Image (spheres, rainbow, N blue to C red):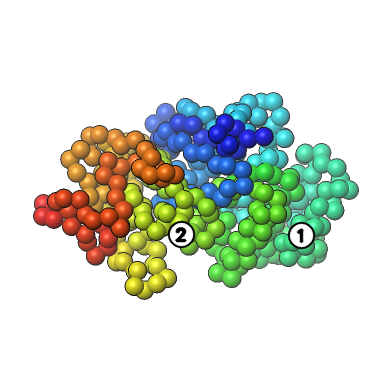
Amino acid sequence: MVGTGGALVEFAAVSVVFGGKVRALDDVTLAIRKGEIVGLVGESGSGKSTLCRVLIGLTPPTAGTVSVSGQPVHEHLAREPLAFRRRAQMLLQDAVASLSPRMTIGRTLDEPIAIHKLPRAETQAWLADILRRLNLPPDVLAKFPHQISGGQARRVGVARALLMRPEIIVADEPTAGLDVSVQGELLNLLLDLQREFGLTYLLVSHNLNVIRHVTGRTAVMYLGQIVEEAATHDVFAAPAHPYTVALLSTNPAVDPSKRRAPIVLQGEIPSAVNPPSGCRFHTRCPVAQARCTSDAPALVEISPGRQVRCHFPFSLAAKPRPGLRETQSGLHEPSSPG
Ligand code: SF4
């Protein structure tokens, strides 16, 4: 069963404010259909991890609702907490730290079987199948976390999630810290599992190549808000939000003729305690105009399937607006700076 509009997961105007003043998420609306792989990108502090935690019920929204199959997560958790925990699993960023150093891998994997009272014989057979798919040798069960590699620890995390036969997997930087070949293996594995079991992924990664190759849709976050959301191909081919342009400019194109000089944004991401007035990106936006400092843009659909939070969205393919010129980086900046 899915929610209204065919979405399995729906964030509706979700805000999270920590301690009454840190606005970690602000008015986030995002729908994820069953079987989709949606990527989240943005600098550290943009709210990606908070969004993941809201989805699996670890962080309650201060305002708005996140629903799974049309029912708010807090209701799932109130009525059938264990069933919901099985449906939505999270792959943690620090796989090694998430494993108890005092427990063998076998005991670590046995714990959720006991907590969720899963049928033992059937689950053990499923576990053996999972280990085989993950290329984890059976003797890994007798080892302690310090006796296995980082790549194996990541696979153990995947095994622990799959044991529950989840529908939704939230993966926060699943390949961070792994060497390139192990990253590729793990991503291919996640894709195989997604195809085989129709899983739905929300994937966070700083690695834009991972997002480009694995996801079908991408949401770009800045200071707690989604500033652009569209099919991944469209985001990478012609970013419309100036922040997206800057973010993607740091990711070298494979084709040298399409490479552009990286745009170095000035300053750090502002504090979520006291975000800038108007457009939150105006303090760093190379094409900000007077209106941007006072008038907060809404996330609006500028073309079918593409939403952008900017008064002056543009495409790299488009000609500069009057009064602007195209820089070497592809941004359109005022013709007469200052
Ligand atoms: Fe830049 Fe203005 Fe668009 Fe914000 S609204 S991203 S400041 S052009």
> Is the CB–ligand 1 distance for label 1 below 8 Å?
no
Marks 1,2: beta carbons within 8 A? no
Between 58 and 13, the one lying in front of the other is 13
What is the crowding at mark 2: few (fewer than 14 residues within 10 Å), some, or many (at least 20)?
many
> Is the CB–ligand 1 distance for label 2 below 8 Å?
no
Q: Under tag 2, what secondary structure?
A: helix
Q: Position of residue 244 (x, y in %)?
A: 36, 52
The residue located at (69%, 44%) in the rendering is 166
The quarter holding residue 247 reads: bottom left
The residue that disc 2 covers is 208
Q: Under tag 1, what secondary structure?
A: helix
Q: Is residue 320 left or right of residue 215?
A: left
Q: Which mark is residue 288?
A: none
Q: Position of residue 334 (x, y in %)?
A: 16, 53
Q: First in sequence, mark 1 or 2: give its number.
A: 1
Can the viewer see residue 217 in this picture?
Answer: yes
Q: Tell me the distance, in whole angstroms, between the alpha carbons under discs 1 and 2.
A: 29 Å
Q: Position of residue 297 (x, y in %)?
A: 30, 37
Between 146 and 291, the one lying in front of the other is 291
Q: Is residue 319 left or right of residue 248?
A: left
Q: Which mark is residue 131?
A: 1
The residue located at (26%, 44%) in the rendering is 312
Three-letter code, disc 1: Leu
Q: Position of residue 282 (x, y in %)?
A: 26, 44
Three-letter code, disc 2: Leu
The residue located at (33%, 49%) in the rendering is 241
What is the crowding at mark 1: few (fewer than 14 residues within 10 Å), some, or many (at least 20)?
some
